[in-house]
Image (spheres, helix red, strand yellow):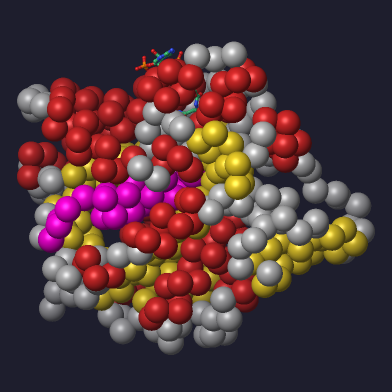
Amino acid sequence: MTTSVGIHDLSFATTEFVLPHTELAAHTGVDIGKYHIGIGQRSMSIPALDEDIVTMAATAAAPIVERWGADRIRTVVLATETSIDQSKAAGIYVHSLLNLPPSTRVVELKQACYAGTAGLQFAMGLVHRDPTQQVLVIATDVSRYDLDSAGESTQGAAAVAMLVSADPALIRIEPQSGLHTSDVMDFWRPNYRSTALVAGQESISAYLQALEGVWKDYTEQGGRPLPEFAAFCYHQPFTKMATKAHRHLFNTTGHDLDEDQMTAMLRLTTAYNEVLGNSYTASMYLALASLLDHAGDLTDQPIAFASYGSGCVAEFFGGTVVPGYLEHLRTDGHQAVVERRRSIDHHTYRTLHGRSLPEDGGHHLTPKQTTGPFRFAGLSGHKRLYEHS
Ligand code: CAA
């Protein structure tokens, strides 16, 4: 018996604040063309003092639980690069904030920006084993580089929550996957650092090489021919990377590429990432959200996914858009999530960037800044406190 399994619902959340790249450029002295055109970024989401991966994850997932209920959710997988604890899974706080049933398994996954895809694939396996169950997969990250570094302008933050289910309402995920792992140091973050280390240009090359690797393996696994795909969702650490990846994939596999068609197709996938910034694990799924929310009717169209996580692991797979999906989109809600952010100036951004949490085990309450539904209320006895706003 073959069961169709895939993404039943998708919802995203981001932060309270936003820093426009015009404001960044005014202080860095960098020509705005480098940000807007060179890397394809217009603004970046900045967390308030009382926001983090947990508050974004819970905010992203709450509308899904509200729409479908929690009765069939027996697993929560939270993927992140921005872990808040070396031991406890951040998803347990989300489980608690969303009042999910105790008969749930909750686990956290890590592999840089790739872990959301690992979560999706693991969820697929669980649902295939028991199609009555659903899995809540949440990819949530705050991308942070050092101030005044080359990576600074690609920072951002967001969470994407996906409900993985049999007979999905949005996308059926196809069984063939192309995989690639190689040991490279293109981007990493030792446990003692709050900002990532990156070898900028090498990270772009590593991404492109991994893309070649996953495509080769995808083909060997019996995947679709490249021209069959109607659209391509790439991991977008900055949105120009999608163009680099797409061109590279077509050129290295000997396919003709119509530049105008490519630009028009990729533009549909970049609308959210170009204003939210890099959200690591969530980024490729924001590309999917952007595509579904902005393209015309994609019913029965095959979509390609190219996931990349530095270090590095990559995966290429396909999915087909399900008839009736348009009724389940959250386009207005997503637009509202982007537009509700409050603009901050450069000084405020730098102050927020410099924030660090006290390590003395004392009782420290966080000032109220977020207007979102959940907040990180502070630390007490080394324990994180979360509450409904
Ligand atoms: N007008 C228009 N374009 C301009 C311009 C101007 N005034 N000035 C510069 N540009 C263009 C450049 O020509 C260049 O374009 P191409 O890439 O097409 O040649 C582009 O702007 C960027 O310029 P530089 O290459 O000089 O930029 P940089 O070296 O200062 O930084 C970066 C770019 C390496 C991506 C840096 O932002 C960075 O380190 N980012 C973080 C790492 C990253 O995102 N890596 C991506 C792959 S790794 C990954 O995917 C995992 C992950 O999420 C981190």
Q: Nearer the viewer, residue 212 or 82?
A: 82
Determine whether 203 is above or below 304 in the image.
above
Q: Main secondary structure of the magenta part?
A: helix
Q: Position of residue 223 (x, y in %)?
A: 13, 48
Q: Which residues are magenta?
A: 279-299
Residue 295 in magenta?
yes
Q: Position of residue 294 (x, y in %)?
A: 26, 50
For residue 126, side relative to residue 26 (left or right)? left
Q: Position of residue 246 (x, y in %)?
A: 23, 31
Residue 6 in magenta?
no
- State the residue at coordinates (44%, 50%): 282
Q: Nearer the viewer, residue 157 or 139?
A: 157
Which quadrant of the figure has residue 67? bottom left
Determine whether 309 is above or below 55 in the image.
above
- State the residue at coordinates (68%, 50%): 48
- State the residue at coordinates (84%, 60%): 365
Quadrant of the rendering where the N terminus is positioned: bottom left
For residue 220, side relative to residue 145 (left or right)? left
Q: Nearer the viewer, residue 88 or 13?
A: 13
Determine whether 374 is above or below 210 in the image.
below
Rendered-image quarter of ligand 1: top left
Quadrant of the rendering where the C terminus is positioned: bottom right
